[in-house]
Every structure is written in C-alpha cells, then in structure tokens.
Image (tube, rainbow, N blue to C red):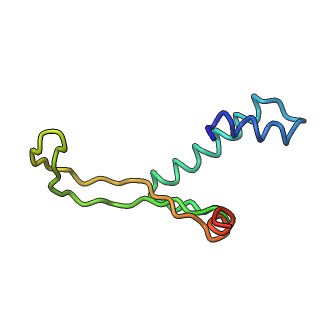
Amino acid sequence: MTKKDLIETVQKRLKDYPKKDVSFAVNIMFQAMMDALIRNERVEIRGFGNFTVRSRDSRRGRNPQTGAIVDVPFRKVPFFRVGRELRRIVDY
C-alpha cells in the first residue's frame, strides 16, 4: 500500500471529507512522526508498533563488486518494531 492508496482508503471511509482534506491530514500525521524521530523521540501506535531511532557505529565494510575495504561512518537509522496485536493478526 502506498501513501496514495492510504489516502484513497481513508477518503472512502470518510465520505464527508474531500480527498484534498484527507490528503492534508495524512501528510500532517506523517510529518509529525518524522519530526518526532528527528528529535530522537519514540513514536508508538498501540496495536500497530513503535518507531525508534537506532545508532549504528562506524565500521569497516566491503564493497561487494570490487572486494575493496571501505569505512562505513556512524549513522542513525529509523527502526520499526511490530506490535503484538498486529503480529498476531498477520500470523493468524
């Protein structure tokens, strides 16, 4: 499902609202989640899962095409952990 599909699904359920307003609301939600992750805060959606930021230390890696050793710098990456309810529903 893409963001466009999500907007269309929400708009079908909320028929009183125009697609433009639903799109605006979905974009606000995603932006709020991104802003929280930028501030290194945890985003928790009960029953769905948590989004956090994890740190990856610098390390030595290997270029798979050439085999050359390369230094991979420290970085922060978003991480998603699925919630218990969603895991149970998907696993049925």
- Asked whether, in this view, residue 2 is left or right of residue 20, the answer is left
User: Does residue 36 sit above or below 3 in this rendering?
Assistant: below
Q: Quadrant of the C terminus?
A: bottom right
What x and y, as percent, mark residue 87?
Answer: 62, 66
What x and y, as percent, mark residue 76?
Answer: 35, 54
User: Does residue 50 sit above or below 37 in this rendering?
Assistant: below
- Asked whether, in this view, residue 81 is left or right of residue 45, the answer is left
Please name whichever residue, 20 or 81, is drawn nearer the observer in this view of the structure: 81
Instruction: Report the residue at 13% width, 47% height from top.
Output: 70
Q: Among all residues in the image, which is located at the extreme left? A: 68
Q: Quadrant of residue 4?
A: top right
What x and y, as percent, mark residue 19?
Answer: 78, 30
Q: Among all residues in the image, which is located at the extreme right? A: 16
- Asked whether, in this view, residue 24 is left or right of residue 69, the answer is right
Instruction: Report the residue at 52% width, 59% height from top.
Output: 51
What x and y, as percent, mark residue 72?
Answer: 20, 50
Please name whichever residue, 24 or 49, is drawn nearer the observer in this view of the structure: 49
Instruction: Report the residue at 69% width, 65% height from top.
Output: 89
- Asked whether, in this view, residue 76 is left or right of residue 18, the answer is left
Q: How many numbered discs?
A: 0
User: Does residue 11 sit above or below 42 in this rendering?
Assistant: above
Q: Among all residues in the image, which is located at the extreme front? A: 92
Q: Quadrant of the N terminus?
A: top right
